[in-house]
Image (cartoon, grey):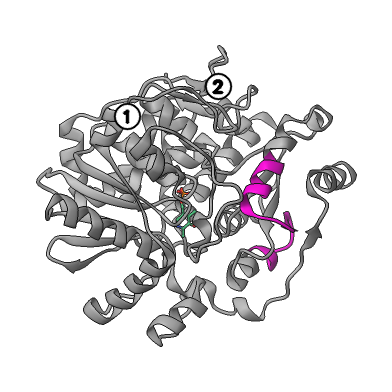
Amino acid sequence: MIKFFSTNGHQERVDFKGALLAGQAPDKGLYMPESLPILSQEIIQGFPQMSYHQIAYQVIKPYIGELVAEQALLDMLKDAYSFDVPLERVYDGKYLLRLDRGPTCSFKDFAARLMARLMQYFLKEEGKSIIILTATSGDTGSAVAHAFYGLENIRVIVLFPEKEVTERQRRQMTTLGKNIYPLAVAGKFDDCQAQVKQAFADPDLAGLALSSANSINIGRLLPQAVYYFYAHSRVAPGGEKVVFSVPSGNFGDLMGGLIALKMGLPVKKFVAATNENDEFPLFMQTGRYEPIQPSKNCISNAMNVGHPSNLARLFALYGGQMDESGQVIRQPELSAMREEIYAVSISDEETRQTIKDAYTRYMVLLEPHGAVGWAGLQRYLREFGDWNPAVSLETADPAKFPDEIVRLTGINPPLPPAMASLDEKEENYLRMAGGYASLKEYLMEFF
Ligand SMILES: *Cc1c(COP(=O)(O)O)cnc(C)c1O
């Protein structure tokens, strides 16, 4: 069975269950699979005839081995992926992969829903309970809160940057109650993420059984390899190579794609499209990495990340090493990275122009994150020549970002059924102004 190692180099190896329940490795590194199983071409050629959850089973099973009974895993997958995953043709062989049809209308539902079910399964087996402590730039918090809502044995604390989420993003976290505890932090996403990491490393909190649901958790990552296989099976049933464009912030989504690639998915190129937080595109150009501090506040708010956690995994995948602070311990193989990834930064101005153009030219309503991906794809096609099929990921529903979209297109994006009556529900949350000290005090007093 596949074991998981820590990107910080500690010698201990754990199985999938251990990695999932711990979230972060004890040496503050991120867990990565020691080897990546390669799916045979025969298996991949069967995917066009399979449904989403059947493909998910093939992709995820090798990591889980015998830890979950076969039927239980199939049931979980069927239950987690009970919504549509449309591929919308925009022009020629260019598609949007709509990952916004889950209960909180962002792609984060894909990972959160399976992770919640797996955690619940393992915790029941052990008779244990845990506290999920997670930071969100806007969409993780609601996806995780909804996925874990009402479960026994699990309480969820979500830290979000008070001024950097939209009202609807906030409401998706603050109107649930029960086992969900939202905390508004006076700061940025990076501050939320830093506080969460500090809590994990704090010996005074060791008794709390904290776990993470951020993309630092390997349980978030593996489900995100699945939709690349799914999209490929729908747009390239003959096995052609596909260009994927991925709007990126913390780089969990892109890591899912790279894992799919290493598992045998035929990919021409990944476009890693960031907003003005361009630390990764700059690294790809220069080979020097510098976190952006503080991160820039762009309209694609879920991607306002000045130091993406998952770069530690990305480096590990290419033979390098990066510690949790962004220090490069060993350079990855840049030429191999450039072979597989084209990195590009899209300004807010270009993002806005892209939303307008997509609407006027194709009658397609993009939201800011999907627009960064779409603009990144256009840049790639201009620079390297046309390519079909190409898939750009639309990671959220436009109704999560109504103000910007009304301004740009004059269209008020219709509320998807999953968000109906959200604007009327009562909110409950606490404000945290005192940095890590106040988070610690809160945890020690109430949990
Ligand atoms: C989180 C998020 C992203 C960025 O995904 P990463 O895995 O952090 O790179 C992009 N778009 C939306 C809508 C998101 O919520």
- Give x and y (percent) for residue 437: 84, 44
Q: 271 or 102, which is in the foreground?
A: 271
Where does the C terminus fall, quadrant-wise?
top right
The residue positioned 73% from the left and 71% from the top of the image is 427
Q: 120 or 212, which is in the foreground?
A: 212
Instruction: State the SS at label 1.
Output: helix
- Give x and y (percent) for residue 434: 83, 51
Q: On the picture, is 100 further left or further right than 421? A: left
Where does the N terminus fall, quadrant-wise?
top left
Q: Mark 1 points at which residue?
A: 334
The residue positioned 45% from the left and 56% from the top of the image is 276
State the extent of the magenta-drawn residues as a range: 173-196
Q: Name the residue under label 2.
A: 8
Disc on the earlier residue, 2 or 1? 2
192 w.r.t. 286: above or below: below
Question: Is 188 covered by the magenta stretch?
Answer: yes
Name the residue type under label 1. Answer: Leu
Residue located farthest toward the top when viewing the structure as drawn:
11
Q: 228 or 148, which is in the foreground?
A: 228
Residue located farthest toward the right when viewing the structure as drawn:
445
The residue positioned 15% from the left and 43% from the top of the image is 241
344 w.r.t. 265: above or below: below
Residue 170 visible in the snapshot: yes
Q: On the picture, is 111 further left or further right than 297? A: left
Residue located farthest toward the bottom when viewing the structure as drawn:
410
Q: On the picture, is 19 further left or further right than 288? A: right
Residue 413 visible in the snapshot: no
- Give x and y (percent) for residue 395: 41, 59
